[in-house]
Image: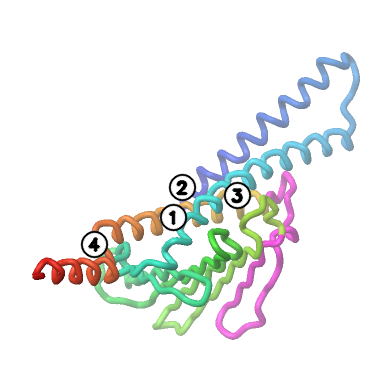
């Protein structure tokens, strides 16, 4: 919670500094001219747009890096980072991460569980779709939360088409696109989604897949083992 407050505070500081700079520049070039509410609003909107554009560029760069893991489609992965499971399907790789919820920080009594199932779809070496399913359950209260975030075009800098699905228990779900989120000075929701969740989420995924590939290099694959065994047998004649 403290870290989240620091991030929000940082965003507001950056926005305030940029907004103040724009207003000061205008007053310097037009001495004595009063800034209208409409002009101020446009300037603030421009600052928000520029800040969001920078986040979109960061997201595109991470997604470009995720595209390199298409080679995992053709490798036998036997080792993965802690509390994770790697599988493959038709045209995609999947990384499942899980954790437990305990009664208290010092308790060993499990009261719930958390899971993330992340699918990366590839066409050749291009990343064409990303889907993350996030689940959290309290076994005692029988309370479930489900979140699904889908990016249908991760190769582009346009993140407005990212879809969000949210449901608690069996209540009617809430569905919307990132482009539907507000992005104003009072409600910078798109910026918060991208900076406080999505970029950190993608960076964590990148790190997990990087270690997964390193484990393949360290421990080899069954294909490599089979080849070595065949080569060893050839020494006998």
Q: Secondary structure at mark 3?
A: helix
Q: CA distance from mark 1 to mark 2?
A: 17 Å
Q: Residue furthest left?
A: 236
Nearer to me, 115 or 159 = 159
Q: Residue beneath label 4, please?
A: 219
Look at discs 1 and 4 and give the one toward the viewer: 4
Vertical side of 144 occupied by 216: above or below: above
Q: CA distance from mark 4 to mark 3?
A: 31 Å
Nearer to me, 121 or 105 = 121
Whichever of callouts 2 and 3 sits on the residue coming sooner in the sequence is 2
Look at discs 1 and 2 and give the one toward the viewer: 1
Q: Residues within 10 Å of mark 1 (few under 14, many from 20)?
A: few
In which image quadrant can residue 137 be found?
A: bottom left
Whichever of callouts 1 and 2 sits on the residue coming sooner in the sequence is 2
Q: CA distance from mark 2 to mark 4?
A: 37 Å
Q: Residue at x 57, y 78 (%)?
A: 168
Instruction: For the C terminus, give its image quadrant.
Output: bottom left
Q: CA distance from mark 2 to mark 3?
A: 25 Å
In which image quadrant can residue 73 be found?
A: bottom left
Q: Do the residues under discs 2 and 4 have CB atoms within 8 angstroms?
A: no
Look at discs 2 and 3 and give the one toward the viewer: 3
Q: Secondary structure at mark 1?
A: helix
């Amino acid at each position: 919670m403290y870290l989240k407050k620091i991030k929000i505070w940082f965003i507001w500081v950056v926005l305030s500094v940029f907004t103040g700079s724009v207003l000061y520049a205008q007053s310097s070039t037009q001495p004595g001219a009063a800034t209208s509410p409409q002009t101020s609003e446009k300037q603030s909107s421009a600052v928000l747009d520029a800040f969001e554009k920078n986040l979109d560029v960061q997201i595109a760069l991470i997604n470009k890096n995720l595209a390199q893991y298409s080679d995992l489609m053709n490798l036998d992965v036997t080792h993965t980072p802690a509390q994770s499971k790697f599988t493959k399907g038709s045209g995609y790789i999947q990384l499942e991460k899980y954790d437990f919820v305990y009664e208290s920080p010092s308790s060993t009594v499990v009261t719930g569980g958390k899971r993330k199932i992340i699918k990366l779809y590839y066409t050749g070496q291009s990343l064409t779709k990303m889907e993350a399913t996030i689940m959290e359950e309290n076994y005692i209260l029988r309370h479930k939360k489900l979140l699904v975030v889908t990016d249908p075009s991760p190769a582009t800098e346009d993140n407005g088409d990212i879809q969000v699905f949210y449901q608690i228990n069996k209540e009617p779900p809430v569905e919307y696109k990132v482009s539907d989120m507000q992005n104003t000075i009072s409600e910078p929701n798109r910026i918060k989604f991208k900076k406080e969740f999505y970029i950190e989420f993608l960076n964590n995924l990148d790190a997990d897949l990087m270690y997964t590939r390193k484990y393949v290099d360290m421990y080899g694959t069954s294909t490599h083992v089979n080849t070595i065994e065949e080569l060893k047998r050839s020494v006998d004649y």
